[in-house]
Image (cartoon, grey):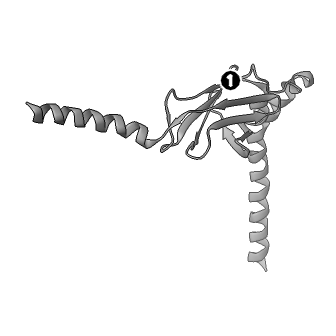
Amino acid sequence: MNKLLSSILIAFTVLVCMAPASAKEDSSFEEQYEALDNSIILDRIGNSDLEVIMPSTIFSFKPANIQLKFVNPEHNKLVINKNKLKFIINGDEKELEFVNGVAEFEIDFSEQERLSIYIEDYSFSQNVVAYPLWAFLVPIGLLIGWILYRIIKR
């Protein structure tokens, strides 16, 4: 009976000691959240807040790496949501994590030729030209064939 009572006392003490430690981790977020003015919280993400960075050449046989970059890396929505925001990308909801105001994701353009990104008041839509594998290999094959023809002709 004495061992049971002492083990319950130890378990209770451990739980009580852990509760303040876990509350301290979230206190900095709560302090930042309380410091924000309520009128600023209504600040929505618009077209002037985000920039989409796409590679100059996109191939249909390889996923393209797309970057979303906040103009202000300390945007209120990023602070409130702990640098994680949910976007609708080509009809699918994806949660992106921002590091220093920049998030990256990969998308495959083998079956689609359009990129659309939406969140709150932000919308981005662009047609994408994705080059197939044959468009990459045919010019190389023609160049090698022409070189071999020139060598054999001599």
Drawn side of residue 73 relative to residue 44, left or right? left
- Outermost residue toward the right? 39
Picture coordinates of residue 148, whole percent (x, y)? 17, 36
The reply to whether residue 83 is in sight is: no
Q: Secondary structure at mark 1?
A: loop
In this orientation, which residue lies closer to the viewer: 98 or 56?
Answer: 56
Provide the residue designation for mark 1: 73
Looking at the image, is 113 positioned above or below residue 39?
below
Between residues 17 and 83, which one lies in front from this camera angle? 83
* Residue nearer the viewer, 78 or 105: 105
Q: Outermost residue, front direction?
A: 153
What is the quadrant of the C terminus in the image?
Answer: top left
> Dividing the picture into quarters, in which one does residue 151 lie?
top left
Q: Amino acid at mark 1?
A: Pro
Q: Quarter of the image holding residue 45? A: top right
User: Which residue occupies 52% across, 42% down?
Assistant: 63
Compared to 6, does 120 lie above or below? above
Residue 40, percent from left and from top:
87, 22
- From the viewer's perspective, tell me whether residue 60 is left or right of residue 53: left
Q: Residue at x 71, y 35 (%)?
A: 117
Task: Decide if residue 149 is in sight here.
Answer: yes
Of residue 147 and residue 59, the one placed in the foreground of this image is: 147
The residue at the point 70 percent across, 20 percent down is: 72
